[in-house]
Amino acid sequence: PVQKAWIEHDVAQCGYCQSGQIMNAVSLLERNADPSDEDIAQAMNGNICRCGTYTRIKAAIKTAAKEV
Ligand code: FES
């Protein structure tokens, strides 16, 4: 579901950070199936994206959460 949501939201730009972002998103959703904006911000805080895809990452996590 996370990979599908990433594609649906066209999250990646250069792609360099994306494997780590996806792994962290999966870990978050395993712990919290309905994360708030604050939960997502806290959980994803350690993953830096130089391309600034944070808004799309948050949207994709919310989409994936509906399917997990
Ligand atoms: S997509 Fe380029 S660093 Fe995140």
Image (cartoon, helix red, strand yellow):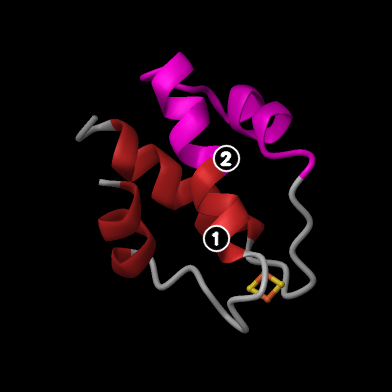
Residue range highlighted in magenta? 24-46
Residue 36 belongs to magenta span: yes
Check disc 1 and report the residue beneath it: 19
- Disc 1 or 2, which lies upstream in sequence? 1
Q: Is residue 50 above or below residue 36?
A: below
Q: Are marks 1 and 2 in contact (CB under 8 Å)?
A: no
Residue 46 left/right relative to 3: right
Q: Residue shown at 50%/40% (left/top)?
A: 25
How many numbered callouts? 2
Q: What residue occupies the far top of the structure in this picture?
A: 31
Q: Amino acid at mark 1?
A: Ser
Q: Position of residue 62 (x, y in %)?
A: 39, 38
Q: How many other residues sit within 10 Å of disc 1, few (<14), some (14-19) or many (≥20)?
A: few
**Is the CB of the residue bearing disc 2 within 8 angstroms of ligand 1?**
no
Residue 41 left/right relative to 1: right
- Callout 1: helix, strand or loop? helix
Could you say which disc has been placed on residue 24 in the image?
2
Q: Residue shown at 47%/15% (left/top)?
A: 31
- Callout 2: helix, strand or loop? helix
Q: Amino acid at mark 2?
A: Asn
Q: Residue shown at 72%/68% (left/top)?
A: 52
Q: Quadrant of residue 39?
A: top right
Q: Is residue 31 above or below residue 65?
A: above
Q: Quadrant of ligand 1?
A: bottom right
Mark-to-mark CA distance, 1 and 2: 9 Å
Q: Position of residue 40 (x, y in %)?
A: 60, 32
